[in-house]
Amino acid sequence: MKRLLAVLCLGSMGLPAQVTYSKEISRLFMAKCQSCHREGDIGPFALDSYEAAKSWSADIQRVVRDKIMPPWKPVEGHGSFQNNFGLSDDERRMILDWYKAEAPEGDKADLPEASAPTGEWHLGEPDAIIQMPELYNVPRRKDVYRCFVVPTGYDEDLWLKSIQVVPGNRQVVHHVIVYLDASGKSTELDAKDEEPGYDCYGGPGDGIPITLDSLAGGWVPGTRASMLSPGVAIRIPKKTKIIIQMHYFPAGKQHSDQTKIGFYFAKPEDKITKRMFFLPLVNDRFRIPPGNKDFEVTASVPVLPGMTGDIHMVVPHMHLIGKRIQVTRSNVFSRINDSLVLIDDWDFNWQGFFAYEKPVRLNVLDQLKLSCRFDNSADNPRNPSNPLKEVRWGEGTEDEMCLAFLGLTFDNENIINSIRFNKPKR
Ligand code: HEC
């Protein structure tokens, strides 16, 4: 990184700075592109050699210039997140300059060492592995949103430090969300559908309540599994059913998938004192008029005494006609006014679980606010409704959501005594 900076400084002083593939661009592509653009992953080509970079260079300059790639959505300066694979403005400029200079290769001796393979499990062997109950044949030529139910049968609460989703087939798996269902409704939905699993689009399925225990994590391309902060874990209530919600890409040929998930449980030496809740910051009572191009829906929650703590993660969520989503924290007394996350070109296809590099403090009388903006006009190419209609909260493709899960821990909680560390029985 030091070398990158040196080159940038020279550039801005007007001295010639030749950006080459071997020196700078290969390192950038390794850090920001190869998590998807490598053999067998979801990127349509591997971006791991000069030949590949050169032959794709015109497309690369277009998608980098137009900010289509890499598909990292949070806007810089609104929250700092782990595993950020977005390009900074300087990095973007460097790629564009390289293209303008006709994509020089430079000296092969400057190439970095190829990144070491990580193996299937980034954090080592998990404590338990659950898997879609059977191989699913993914229908061709359409997006498929499907929930698969895995009963855990765990007869006591378990405490999760991390999960890692391993997509069974990276060419068709687009994203995975892992929901927890204590209501048992998912089994009914599964039983009603003849194929494996049941259809579910923007949530765990019709009638399954969203609670503080609804979410366990997820996967989008580029995600790397990491452990929660020291002392923090997520509770999986006993007898919970795990719902694996899959989004599959349209694929030209026949593909099948059986995605699996590794659970990493807290150990006695982890000294868990805090439970991470997924607080849904949500407005489910809106009506977006047909034709309205910029309709705002908001929700807000005050931090009352006793609710102070830390935010570890944010998971913004809307459906197709959402265009902008933001979470802010403000306080009229201390005059804080922070933007915790902003996505200003929402794309349902590129959602994320964004973990803060440093937890965000929540002080008493802070106001947490969610703002969602929707374009329900005919000019919106993503609008699935034709003719236009009033849009409300719901699970379907033509319904909407205005929701952000906040992964929170509270100061006044000390749960150490309620934790048991037995190995899960199934
Ligand atoms: C998180 C996964 C991911 C990352 C990271 C990523 N890509 Fe992509 N890229 C894709 C996928 C998937 C496609 C296929 C098109 C689509 O679905 O958007 C794609 C398509 C492309 C295309 C072809 C676009 C077209 O219109 O034909 C180019 C060029 C590209 N990516 C370049 C890059 C570069 C350069 C980077 C890094 C700076 C990058 N990508 C990072 C997933 C990724």
Image: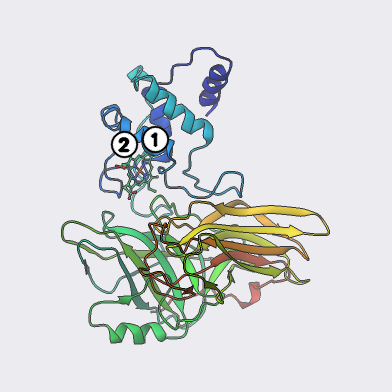
Farthest residue to the top: give it.
15
Residues tagged 1 and 2 counted as in contact (Cβ below 8 A): yes
- Per the image, the residue denoted by label 1 is 29
The kind of residue on which mark 1 rests is Phe
Question: Can the viewer see residue 271?
Answer: no
In the rendered view of the protein, which quadrant contains the C terminus?
Answer: bottom left
Q: Residue at coordinates 21% horizontally, 66% vertically from top-left?
A: 139
Name the side, left or right, on which 129 lies relative to 267: left
**Gap between marks 1 and 2 measured at Cα:** 7 Å
Viewer-nearest residue: 274 or 217 = 217
**Secondary structure under the numbered disc 1 in the rendered image:** helix
Q: Position of residue 305 (x, y in %)?
A: 78, 71
- Where residue 219 sits, quadrant-wise, is bottom left
Q: Residue 47 — which label?
A: 2
User: Who is closer to the viewer here, 84 or 284?
Assistant: 284
Q: Where 344 sits versus 421, above or below?
A: above
The residue carrying mark 2 has its beta carbon less than 8 Å from ligand 1: yes
In-front residue for pair 107/413: 107
Crowdedness of circle 2 by 10 Å Cα count: few (<14), some, many (20+)?
many
Snapshot quadrant of residue 333: bottom right
Q: Is mark 1 within 8 Å of ligand 1?
A: yes
